[in-house]
């Protein structure tokens, strides 16, 4: 029962089992989480909640990796959907959800430095850390987009 629950959470309630782009499909669960976090009253509440979600992803992903087998199986998507909300910290535009999602996926898939260098880390921390850094890079891009680029043209 416990193993089934861990697999259910780790695979994004089955979305990570998608035959088509499981990481992207699984990340969709992060959109309603991010929306909820966007509605929190202060940036400190947003940061704290995002850190809690990312920290929860570590044991979930680590346990699921042991159950499923292999290093960072593609069906494990809790690392994606639980770090996605980081991309909208301090932003209030619903469009930031879309751009945050896109930036997060771009960085997670392309793995630019320093993300690529983090892939050798094992266990739940190793599964989550690259997505955490991808989310931070996406957050920076989102702030650049909404605080600099869009105001220049708006």
Image (cartoon, rainbow, N blue to C red):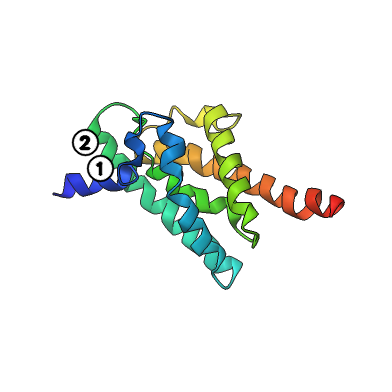
- Secondary structure, mark 1, is helix
Q: Quadrant of residue 137?
A: top right
Above or below: residue 61 compared with residue 119: below
Residue under numbered circle 1: 7
Residue at the image position 73 percent from the left and 53 percent from the top: 146
Image x and y of residue 4, in percent: 19, 45
Ranked by sequence position, the earlier of labels 2 and 1 is 1
Report the disc number at residue 18: none
Image x and y of residue 64, in percent: 27, 39
Disc 2 or disc 1, which is closer to the eye?
1
Q: Is residue 44 left or right of residue 123?
A: right
Image x and y of residue 88, in percent: 59, 55
- Secondary structure, mark 2, is helix
Q: Quadrant of residue 115?
A: top right
Image x and y of residue 47, in percent: 54, 61
Residue at the image position 47 percent from the left and 62 percent from the top: 49
Disc 2 and disc 1 in contact, CB within 8 angstroms: yes
Q: Is residue 83 left or right of residue 72?
A: right
Query: For the residue carrying disc 1, how many other residues have a C-alpha within 10 Å: few (<14), some (14-19), or many (20+)?
Result: many
Residue under numbered circle 2: 67
């Amino acid at each position: 029962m416990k193993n089934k629950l861990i697999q259910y959470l780790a695979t994004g309630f089955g979305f990570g089992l998608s035959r088509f782009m499981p990481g992207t499909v699984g990340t969709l669960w992060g959109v309603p989480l991010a929306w909820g976090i966007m509605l929190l009253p202060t940036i400190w509440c947003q940061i704290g909640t995002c850190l809690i979600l990312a920290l929860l992803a570590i044991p979930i992903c680590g346990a699921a990796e042991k159950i499923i087998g292999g290093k960072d199986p593609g069906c494990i998507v809790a690392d994606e959907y639980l770090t996605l909300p980081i991309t909208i910290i301090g932003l209030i535009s619903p469009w930031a959800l879309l751009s945050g999602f896109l930036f997060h996926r771009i960085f997670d898939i392309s793995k630019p430095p320093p993300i690529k260098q983090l892939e050798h880390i094992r266990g739940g921390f190793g599964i989550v850390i690259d997505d955490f850094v991808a989310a931070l890079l996406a957050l920076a891009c989102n702030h650049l987009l909404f605080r600099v680029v869009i105001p220049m043209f708006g």
